[in-house]
Amino acid sequence: MKLFEINQEQCTQCGICTKVCPVGVLDLGVNGIEETFPHACIACGHCVAVCPTAAIDNHQTPQVNQETIEKFPVLDKKTAQEFLRSRRSIRCYKNIPVPRDQLLELVEIARFAPTGSNSQGISYMIVEDTRILHKATEATIEWMEDQNKTLSHWSFDYHIRSYREKGNDPIFRGAPHLILGTAQSNFPRARENTVFSLTYLELYATALGLGSCWAGLFEMCAFSNYEPLLKLFNVPEGKVLTGAVMVGYPQYSYKRLVDRNPLDVTWL
Ligand SMILES: Cc1cc2nc3c(=O)[nH]c(=O)nc-3n(C[C@H](O)[C@H](O)[C@H](O)COP(=O)(O)O)c2cc1C
């Protein structure tokens, strides 16, 4: 079966589909649009999405699954800057669970992040049961204490004391949910694709009134294959944890945009 279906009556042979294709799957020949390297298609959907007359369809990324919108939104630059700069890592959460449909909405957006060669490949696990989080905090702290026996780490010391002496949760900060990325254990782009996806998720979370924060301490423990932690999550056979972000309703709102290190740029 051919990869493409071209509606010859609608096709104006403008050739835009051939120009936006990242891998040269299509060509504009004397007989119109031809598929030249269909096996190279990465299913990015551009050929279908860009066609001004909806003349092309691609079996790997069907037009019926694409959404037509009249006007692509373009934020004015002040709004765009303020939106991107106002995302914060939230470390104080309300003790309120997030409805399942909102958690689903988050991961639904995460899957639209860009990935090398459109490789995607990230699945998600959403923790709703805070008892799992409490156990995961305890396991991560135990792992940190274990690590400290050989090499004392100042930030580990701080977090261990915060947990053991003050009863704080320095791992998930009292967030009611944790969203985990998982991927096949042999997937070479697993971590980077997780980072792109969860970054999309974090940016979108603000639109739902939600806050989030990377669970980096938890990740360190998980990536070291600490069994007492991993067994809490029942990661499917052949898959590994690739990233984690905590999610919940923020307790406080920020009043100012933070600064960063001065811009360091070189022109060539
Ligand atoms: C990969 C990664 C891991 C992180 N891990 C933690 C963590 O374990 N605990 C935490 O409180 N913040 C964590 N953070 C949040 C950073 O501290 C935060 O992004 C940084 O201080 C900048 O603040 P902002 O995100 O509010 O702009 C992590 C961030 C990233 C990107």
Image (spheres, grey):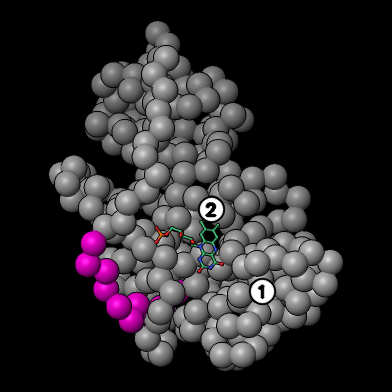
Magenta part of the chain: 247-256
Position of residue 70 measured from the top left corner of the image (x, y, whole percent): 17, 46
Q: Which mark's residue is nearer the viewer, 2 or 1?
A: 1
Disc 1 element:
helix
Look at the picture and state if 182 lies above or below 195.
Answer: below
Magenta residue check for 170: no
Position of residue 210 measured from the top left corner of the image (x, y, whole percent): 34, 73
* Quadrant position of residue 158: bottom right
First-in-chain label (2 vs 1)? 1
Disc 2 element:
helix
Most extreme residue toward the right, as rendered? 150
58 relative position to 187: left or right: left
Disc 1 marks which residue? 157
162 relative position to 88: left or right: right
Q: Quadrant of the N terminus?
A: top right
Q: Identify residue type, mark 2.
A: Val
* Dot 1 crowding, Cα within 10 Å, few <14, some 14–19, many 20+: some
Position of residue 182 measured from the top left corner of the image (x, y, whole percent): 64, 62
Look at the picture and state if 212 lies above or below 5.
Answer: below
Position of residue 230 measured from the top left corner of the image (x, y, whole percent): 74, 74
Q: Nearer the viewer, residue 244 or 47?
A: 244
Q: Is mark 2 within 8 Å of ligand 1?
A: yes
Disc 2 marks which residue? 195
170 relative position to 104: left or right: right
Residue 86's disc number: none
Residue at position x 56%, y 68% in the image: 215
Q: Quadrant of the C terminus?
A: top left
Q: Identify residue type, mark 1.
A: Asp
Rounded to the nearest whole Å, what is the CA distance between mark 2 and mark 1?
Answer: 27 Å
**CB contact under 8 Å: marks 2 and 1:** no
Identify the main secondary structure in magenta.
loop
Residue at position x 61%, y 90% in the image: 165
